[in-house]
Image (cartoon, rainbow, N blue to C red):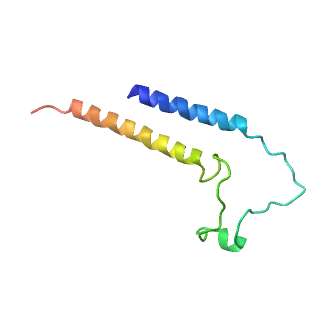
């Protein structure tokens, strides 16, 4: 179990550094106002409950809805599972046997 957790941490770290080094920081350009990249009317899409089909498909793995977001979610679930298994084993060991 410790090897799996260590492997997950190493993979997550490598993905993080790989995407951090691969992306170029945007140049600060204040000459044009911010424009939302939406397919529908912005008033329909921006708010607490945006309507479906307002966004766009991710073009990069690090964008919202991209593959790296799902990878981070899977690593978090795997970590929580490992912690849960450890707690369960600890509780079962500490119980008195009848």
Q: Residue at x 60, y 71 (%)?
A: 51
Image quarter for residue 80?
top left
Outermost residue, left direction?
98
Q: Residue at x 85, y 47 (%)?
A: 28
Above or below: residue 74 compared with residue 46: above
**60 or 26, which is in the foreground?**
60
Residue 67 position, x and y percent, is: 58, 47
Quadrant the N terminus occupies: top left
Outermost residue, right direction?
31
Residue 54 position, x and y percent, is: 65, 67
Quadrant the C terminus occupies: top left
Residue 27 position, x and y percent, is: 84, 45
**28 or 72, which is in the foreground?**
72
Tally the numbered discs. Answer: 0
86 vs 79, left or right, is left
Above or below: residue 3 compared with residue 51: above
Image quarter for residue 83?
top left
77 vs 61, left or right, is left
Q: Residue at x 80, y 45 (%)?
A: 26
**92 or 35, which is in the foreground?**
35
Residue 21 position, x and y percent, is: 71, 34
Q: Residue at x 71, y 73 (%)?
A: 41
């Amino acid at each position: 179990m410790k090897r799996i957790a260590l492997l997950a941490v190493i993979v997550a770290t490598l993905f993080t550094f790989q995407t951090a080094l691969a992306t170029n920081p945007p140049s600060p350009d204040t000459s044009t106002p911010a424009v939302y990249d939406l397919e529908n009317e912005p008033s329909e899409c921006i708010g607490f409950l945006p309507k479906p089909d307002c966004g766009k498909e991710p073009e990069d793995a690090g964008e919202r809805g991209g593959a790296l977001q799902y990878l981070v979610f899977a690593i978090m679930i795997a970590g929580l599972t490992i912690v849960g298994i450890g707690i369960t084993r600890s509780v079962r060991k500490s119980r008195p046997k009848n």
